[in-house]
Amino acid sequence: KQEVTQIPAALSVPEGENLVLNCSFTDSAIYNLQWFRQDPGKGLTSLLLIQSSQREQTSGRLNASLDKSSGRSTLYIAASQPGDSATYLCAVRLNYGQNFVFGPGTRLSVLP
Amino acid sequence: EPEVTQTPSHQVTQMGQEVILRCVPISNHLYFYWYRQILGQKVEFLVSFYNNEISEKSEIFDDQFSVERPDGSNFTLKIRSTKLEDSAMYFCASSDSGEAYNGYEQYFGPGTRLTVT
């Protein structure tokens, strides 16, 4: 059964710092991996999708990498801003299924 | 930009009552999903739907739950007899055919907060 973990559970940084969020998964037979942002009490906003054949994806200040063989993905946020404060969720989709398995999230606070 | 919409945003119901949560997926998407998130917990998969039938479901999706695509635009989740533990945020999602470079990217709606009293 696929398990997804995220480290750290919570992170507080001053504005302007670069930071890395980590996601690990136990079954490397994934189809793709998606990073989401969730604001308190709100829905999920898709940030980046990485297919299993890709190593990384970039969007603006965000860069996500994927190392399928080691079961890891990282989300790099450059020059963090207070508006980046949210919970960041990692989700993996297995080759043989359609649903995502979500991690517990990393709660990020960027202090002005 | 196309988006997934859900109604209502908040539903309060009494234990034992039936509820129907509604979703309008993105119009050219073919795969539809329901997830739920109990307060403070992980997002959990409930069911996926393709070609007018359930393609996958989790152990959470028992006989109390059903899904339907009653017309060309709506996708509904029905809970027949709600329990206290059904209180959660329910998210609908949709994805495309998987042929594009961003195939199967799931787009989520804003959620319906279900409170069972």
Image (cartoon, coloured by chain):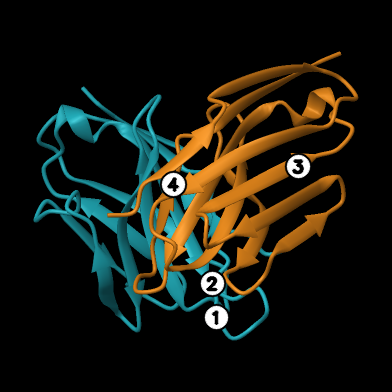
Chain colours: A orange, B cyan
Of all chains, the one bearing label 1 is: B
Residue under numbered circle 4? A102
The part of the image, by quadrant, that contains residue B12 is top left
**The N terminus of chain B: image quadrant:** bottom right
The nearer-to-camera label among 2 and 3 is 3
Residue under numbered circle 2? B104
Of all chains, the one bearing label 4 is: A
Cα–Cα gap, marks 2 and 3: 23 Å
Q: Position of residue A59 (x, y in %)?
A: 82, 55
The part of the image, by quadrant, that contains residue A33 is bottom right
Residue under numbered circle 3? A76
The nearer-to-camera label among 1 and 4 is 4
Of all chains, the one bearing label 3 is: A
Cα–Cα gap, marks 3 and 1: 26 Å
Residue under numbered circle 1? B98
* Left or right of A20 on screen, residue B116: left
Cα–Cα gap, marks 1 and 2: 5 Å
Q: Are marks 1 and 2 on the same chain?
A: yes
**The C terminus of chain B: image quadrant:** top left
Q: Are marks 4 and 3 on the same chain?
A: yes
Cα–Cα gap, marks 2 and 4: 16 Å
Q: Amino acid at mark 4?
A: Phe
Q: Are marks 2 and 3 on the same chain?
A: no
* Left or right of A72 on screen, residue A17: right
Cα–Cα gap, marks 1 and 4: 20 Å
Q: Amino acid at mark 2?
A: Tyr
Identify the residue shown where x is 34% and y is 74%: A96
